[in-house]
Amino acid sequence: MPTVWTIGYEQASMPAFLASLQAAGVELVADVRAVAASRRPGFSISALAANLTEAEIGYRHFRVLGTPPAGRAAARALNLPVLKQIYAGQLELPEAMVASAELADLVHERRVALLCYERDPACCHRTLLREAVLADCEVVDLYP
């Protein structure tokens, strides 16, 4: 049974984030944020990719597997039923189906961590994604 890791960078420093990934042996970070920008230093797309490359970890942005604006608002309000409904619709988009298949292939070939902002995976769409697309995988949630 393949394993998938998940990680959120909320409250994390870049050194702690990288150390968590390296300790787990992660080979590729699958960024599943719709908007790969961050006010936290080092976590916007270009800086993140550079930091991961320096740590010898691959990077791939799956923008279409991110949460649309209404879903992000629901997550911030901790309205998980609304988040689930909105995100289920997102995953039904043809481009999301293609990206989901690509992600599943990668997870079955390499050690992949799903990345989003939220520290707690129970409050994040990455758990919904994992349950919908990677149900055949064991999960390890990392907390940098």
Image (cartoon, rainbow, N blue to C red):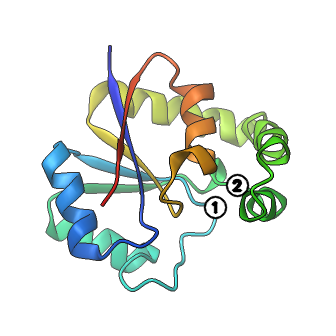
> Which amino acid, by three-letter code, is at mark 1?
Ala
Of residues 24 and 35, the one nearer the viewer is 24
Q: Secondary structure at mark 2?
A: loop
Pointers 1 and 2 in contact (C-beta within 8 Å): yes
Q: Residues within 10 Å of mark 1 (few under 14, many from 20)?
A: some
Could you say which disc has been placed on residue 67 in the image? Answer: 2
- Residue displayed at 27% across by 54% down: 58
Does residue 124 show up?
no
Query: Can the viewer see residue 60 in this picture?
Result: yes
Q: Quadrant of residue 93?
A: top right
Q: Tell me the quarter of the picture where residue 139 sits.
A: top left
Question: Which residue is the site of mark 1?
Answer: 34
- Alpha-carbon distance for marks 1 and 2? 6 Å
Q: Could you tell me which residue is drawn at 78 percent across and 56 percent down?
A: 71
The answer to whether 95 is drawn above or below residue 58 in the figure is above
Coordinates of residue 72 in the picture (x, y in percent): 74, 62
Q: Where does the image place residue 76, in percent across and percent down from the top left?
A: 73, 65
Q: Inspect the image, locate mark 2, and give the three-letter code of the amino acid beneath it.
A: Thr
Quadrant where the N terminus sits is top left
